[in-house]
Image (cartoon, grey):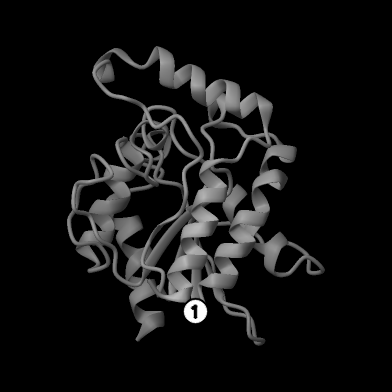
Amino acid sequence: MTAQRVLWERLNREIIGCQRCPRLVEWREQVARERRRAFADWEYWGKPVPGFGDIEARVLIVGLAPGAHGSNRTGRMFTGDSSGDFLYRALHEAGFASQPTATHSEDGLDLQDIFITAVCRCAPPDNRPLREEILNCQPYMVEELRLLNRLEGIVALGRIAFERVQRILRPDHPLLPFRHGAFYKPADHFPWLLASYHPSRQNTQTGRLTAEMFAGIWQRVRDELG
């Protein structure tokens, strides 16, 4: 195992064992015990979810938080719910994912040049983490950013992810405005930042985010990577 891989394994163990937010610990474990009827036979993950993907990635995707019956069930980012279905289909079509589906952590899905993380690693009630919970989780993303030593750009899924990335990388700068497709390329050494609506069911089923709009995001990523 390479030294870089050892550092990733250590970080993932720290994330999985995190107990920093009592409200989130209680909620994620309650969901894992009670389960949804459709997944009654599953043994839920019920723990914080580490990042997933290519540790040599040039692009980082940042989401909000695990879904209660998605990542909190499967233990892998954007896996087992409609948001993941929408995301991985688009990544597969753009050539970043080995398959268009993500059903469980051992389904063979592999990512190329993409690493996926989230602002918050535990499923929050009503999908709304509190500010202090986001701050408790922030050091994990900071470390991932440090370990992704080939990083060129970041795709932020949703306003909260978009603003959190800015607060981490450029805390002394005013926040850039969020809109779908907004692209910012700093003149300094920081990675470029691309904003997208989150592929939540609320956005995709209402037409706020269409498959064509989302495909445009990943085409822009391809263009930037050359």
Outermost residue on the right side: it is: 172
Q: Which residue position holds label 1?
A: 152
Give the residue drawn at x 47%, y 73%. Answer: 4
Q: In this view, does 34 lie above or below 203?
A: above
223 lies above or below 13: below
Q: In which quarter of the image is residue 1?
A: bottom left
> Residue 107: percent from the left, percent from the top?
19, 47
The answer to whether one can see residue 158 in this image is no
Please give the name of the residue rendered at 35% of the width and 41% of the height, measured from the top-left corner. 83
Q: Residues within 10 Å of mark 1 (few under 14, many from 20)?
A: some
> Position of 178 compared to 201: left or right?
right
Res. 210 visible in picture: yes
Along the line of sight, the residue nearer the viewer: 31 or 64: 31
In percent of width and height, residue 103 lies at: 23, 40
Residue occupying image coordinates x 25% and y 17%: 38
Q: Position of residue 124 (x, y in %)?
A: 56, 30
Mark count: 1
Q: Name the image quarter holding residue 75.
A: top left
Secondary structure under the numbered disc 1 in the rendered image: loop
- Locate the C terminus by quadrant: bottom left
| Picture layout, residue 104 above or below residue 14 | above
The x and y percentages for residue 70 are 36, 33
**Kind of residue at disc 1:** Glu
Q: In this view, does 201 lie above or below 137?
A: above
Residue placed at 22% from the left, 55% from the top? 109
- The residue nearer to you, when weighing 110 against 177, is 110
- Please tell me which residue lies in front, 38 or 4: 4
- In the depicted view, which residue is nearer to us: 191 or 2? 2
